[in-house]
Structure formats: C-alpha cells, structure tokens
Amino acid sequence: MRKKSILILAAMAAIALACSGCKKREPVDLSSLHTTQAVETESIKETSPAKPTDAPSESVSPAPSDSAAVKTELKTEQIGSSSVQYPQISGMKDSSRQEEANAILKNNALAVAKAYPDQTFSVRASVEAVNLKRVTVSYRGSVSSGAGGEERFFYSNTLDLDTMENLGLSDFTDAYTVAGYIVSGDYKLSDAAGNEESIRSELNTPDRTVEYYYNKLKAADFSAGGDAWPGIFSYEKQGVVYVSLPVSQAAGGYVLIHYSPDNK
C-alpha cells in the first residue's frame, strides 16, 4: 500500500513538471507585421532610380531679332567741297532688293544738294532705327552763310524695305492732329539750339493757325513727292513721333518737337 502511494505521488509530480513548461502563448499581431512590410515596400519604390529614357533632350535656341539680320554702315560722299554722310545696309536675303534700298537711301541723302546749290555744306547721318521692315535715318547739317557763319538744317528719311517706298508723317500719325498739337503749344522740344521761349514765340504767332500748319505738314517728307525740298521732316522712333519745324537762324534754324500719339 505504501509502495502504491509512492508511485501515485511520483506520477503526479511528473505531470506537474510537464504542465509547468506549458506556458500560455500570446497571440501574434499580424497587422503590425503587415504595416511594417508595406512601409518598407513604399520606401523601396521611392528610392529606386528612374529608368533611363532613350529620347534625346531638345534644346531651344532663341530666335534672332530683326535688327540683328540687317546691319548699316555709314559712308561719305563728296560733292565738290561739300560732304554728305549716308547709310548703306547689309544682311538682306534678296541682294537685288538690298541694292535697290541702298540706292534710294543714297539718293535721298544726296538730295540736300538741290536745297543748297552752289553752297558748301556738311551733313552727318544717324541711323535712328533699323529692322527687316524699315530703316529710319536722320540728317543734321550746316551750310556756310555769306556772313562767314553757319546755318543749321535737318532732314530725315524712313524707307519701307518691303515696298521700297519712302514713308512720311501720314504713316506715323494724322497731320491735322499734329497741327492742332503745335498750335496748342503743348509739345516738347528737342535738338533746339536757341532759347526755348523765343522758339515757342516763333512757332505760336497768331497767324500760324491749325490750317497753316496742316497745309505745311501735308507736304512733309520725301514721301510727298515732287522736286521741291520739303520744309518739314518727320520720323517715328519707339512710338514717339518727331517733327522738324523751321525757325529763324537766331533761334537755331530748326527745332524738333515730339510727342507720343494715342493711336500709336
């Protein structure tokens, strides 16, 4: 009996030892494993280098400006003891039209000889603007007077390179508008050699009405045609219209008025 009890106790101890090794397992959080794997996958996608492309890269060069296509060079013509500076252009695609344009520019520049026959004069040219469409030139000169002094004069020329025609005031603005502008006295002066007060006094005498200036302005520039030397010249530069008006030599011989037309 005692031996049987010992066997029972030994068996119970063995069972207790075996059960003590059987601990309860905690459930595994599979969601956390899934989240970690997703983050690692996204990180790999973001840091992976992009696949190289076989398409060639395209570089765009800036288009050349019009003024870069046409260039000018000043030349000088001797007429007896007188000299006239004038521009010649280069860079036009059509060489025959370029030759025609240069002939017109030269002829217009040398036309000053008709205005001052048998007199000694000197003319300097200035290219005010040049592009594929137009060439605008202003000329400032002086002629020897009988008293041993010099008189100033001014003229200009704008040549349309498409039509090969001389442009004038009517191509820049309205002559009647300019006439009213002059009579109003609300203008700016430039290239004035005389006193501004005396110049304005000459330009705005009571007999110089809008009609007076309108008739003068209609015959301005080489575009008016005819053999007579125009008493008034004009040109446009960067939206500003310049008009030369004759004044007495005491007031400088001529003066330029300028303004920006509303419709230009």
Image: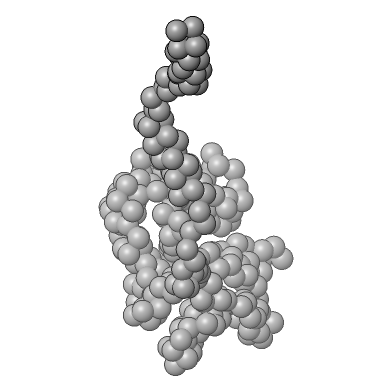
Q: Residue at 32% across / 64% down in the picture?
A: 171
Give the side of residue 173 with respect to residue 205, left or right. left
In the image, farthest residue toward the front: 1
Q: Is residue 182 visible?
A: yes
Tell me what residue is drawn at x 63 percent, y 70 percent.
Answer: 124
Identity of the residue drawn at 36% across and 40% down: 184
**Residue 246 picture location, percent across and down:** 48, 57
Report whether 239 appears left or right of 173. right
Q: What percent of the width, then of the height, locates residue 31?
A: 36, 31
The image shows residue 202, relative to residue 32, as above or below, that is: below
Where does the image place residue 112, in percent across and percent down from the top left? 53, 76
The answer to which of 30 and 212 lies nearer the viewer is 30
Q: Quadrant of the N terminus?
A: top left
Way the structure is coloured: one colour
Outermost residue to the top: 2
Q: Nearer the viewer, residue 80 or 49?
A: 49
| Residue placed furthest toward the bottom | 96
- In the image: residue 106, left or right of residue 158: right
217 up-or-down from 158: above or below: above
Question: In the rendered view, would you say 16 is above or below 245?
Answer: above
Among the 4 quarters of the image, the one containing residue 187: top left
- In-front residue for pair 34/55: 34
Residue in the foreground of this view, choosing between 146 and 32: 32
Q: Is residue 33 left or right of residue 74?
A: left
